[in-house]
Image (spheres, coloured by chain):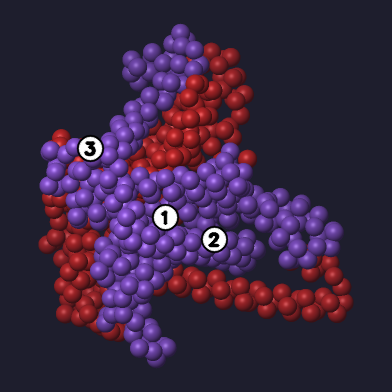
Chain colours: A purple, B red
Amino acid sequence: MKSPSGLVRALDSERFSPNTFAYILMIPAAIVMFGVVVYPFVYNIVLSFSNMSLRHFKDWHLIGMRQYAEVFKGKIFYVVLLKTLVWTFVNIFFHVTIGVSLALILNRRIFGRAAIRTLLILPWAIPQVIVALTWRSMFNYEYGSINLFIAHFLNMAPVEWLGKPLEAFSACIITNVWLGFPFMMTIALGGLQSIPQELYEAADMDGASGWQKFWSVTVPLLKPVMIPAITLGIIWTFNNVNIIWLVSNGGEPSDQTHILVSYVYKAAFNLYRYGYAAALSMVIFAILLTFSLVFLKRTRASETAY
Amino acid sequence: MNHIMKTTGNKFKINNLQSRIISLFLYFLLIGFTLVVLYPILNVFSISLRPGDRLLSTSLKLIPDGASFHAYKVLFAQTPFLLWFWNSSLIAAAVTITGVALASTAGYAFSRFNFYGRKSAMVGLLVTQMFPPTMLLLPMYIMLLKLHLINSYLGVIVIYTSTALPFCVWQMKGYYDTIPFSLEESARIDGSTRWGAFRRIVLPLAAPALVITALFSFMTAWSEYIVAAQVLQDTSLFTLPLGLKQFEASMSTQWGLYAAGSLLVSVPAVALFLILSRWLISGLTLGSVKG
């Protein structure tokens, strides 16, 4: 074959053992991952034991576990953690129930299936920033279309969506539910299509009802596809700083809508508490790692992740 | 629905009616969801058509009174929108090319060779998905500050590539796993080199997965805000999300610009996504279905 460069010609050489060839294929990705993942990761660990902040940017030094103590000392960490858990649970619950229900409907032979499927994928296709900012404008008190709808069709008083903590948090959740269900729907649809039709026919022969077929054929066969997607969904939602940050404009009102990641983002880039933010990042990572290990072990899906 | 056909007599009629009601109900549900999905998009479109003096309106009409393309004209003529579009395209192209090149080779190594450290590297990639965004961003930001690389594209491109890479490598590996080894073996018997067998036999077959990798890398770069907001601070270096956020911040005066801009930014992403969504389902699930 024509080789584009000397390097590739070197690759063609049969002097290498198969494993050396594998290492060569890996090197580029490994260098990138090392430079921008492993090194910063280690650096972050060092920072988390330091007093670095805007005031101590050049003359920082290690101060032991003080930043971690700071994280666990205040009430705020536990409050924000609780909000993060609520945020993750509510979002994933709706993503999965809406996504799987729509997939089940779309898996039937119905008129206009392809068109409706395409339209329902749209929230996933639109850049998240735009989704967030657009919903923010729709939640506007006076001119946002949600309040206009409420006033026009429900004849109720407008809701102060972005001005009150609970309402603002709900606004973030509504936005995230809207943009997140197509992912689960797509995965579920792929899973449903891979279930052999013969299984349903066999169940018919045994006189199974629709409900029985759902629980004994569809659910067990959909599970191996959905579990990795749900695991990934939980991690992504837990770590989703975009939606909270942009819909609530950085935690407004008065930092009441933060989840852990947006709280760290603020600590790092608005308040310049680098050491503290690094320590809190480590804590978030520990929480997610523990969760994933337990969850994947429980569902015995670690081999089929992704 | 099959079981309905197999029952007879009275039961058939009842079931038939019942299934029609269910079908109708499901249709309403589908249409309801479709409307909920479409409304925000139509709303943005409607705002983009509003004339400048009627941006803040409480009308729910989809085509506003005095609709015009004024906002689009202003967007192109009086704002750096085109420059931002160019910046974003440049960054997204760089990330897509790097992402595809790195993920296609690394994924192949993971799929075909049982080298030392393979398993831990795979798990390591998975673990990076659990890093909170700040965990890498903060050290990277401080490094960039110290290297005086704030306001450089290199920093952003490298960060985006590393964000997209773990998912892409796993994705590629899962797809390569479904391609039979025997294909390469026969190519090798015919005298092809290892690289040749990979390039000419496996890579073309993995096209659907490559497409997904490209799409995922592109989307990561095209719509990212959080990292760009810290690293790119000069308006002339802004990417589209940063520019749009700036419009949104002064909603009373630039709402129309925001709306028009958002639509134009979404169009390439949505178009790519919809064209490629055919491969999306198989590409994403194949790796897991085969168990």
Instruction: Name the residue: 41% across, 16% down.
Output: A11
Assess whether mark 2 and mark 1 are in contact (beta carbons under 8 angstroms).
Answer: no
Q: Residues within 10 Å of mark 2 (few under 14, many from 20)?
A: many
Residue drawn at point x = 28 percent, y = 80 percent: A141
**Residue A16: x, y in percent?**
46, 11
Marks 1 and 3, Cα distance to the nearest angstrom? 30 Å
Circles 1 and 2 on the same chain: yes
Tag 2 residue: A96
Q: Which mark is nearer the camera, 1 or 2?
A: 1
Tell me if label 2 and label 3 are in contact, CB under 8 Å: no
Instruction: Determine which residue is flagged by label 3.
Output: A62
Tag 2 secondary structure:
helix
Vertical position of residue A299 compared to residue A208: above or below: above
Q: Nearer the viewer, residue B189 or A247?
A: A247
- For the residue carrying disc 1, how many other residues have a C-alpha within 10 Å: few (<14), some (14-19), or many (20+)? many
Q: Quadrant of the N terminus of chain B?
A: bottom right
Q: Amino acid at mark 2?
A: Val
Q: Which mark is residue B157?
A: none
Instruction: Please name the residue shown 81% across and 60% down the image.
Output: A204
Q: Quadrant of the C terminus of chain B?
A: top right
Left or right: B267 in relation to A221: left
Q: Which residue is mark 1?
A: A238
Name the N-terminal-most of marks 2 and 3. 3
Q: Earlier in the sequence, mark 1 or mark 3?
A: 3
Above or below: residue B57 compared with residue A210:
below
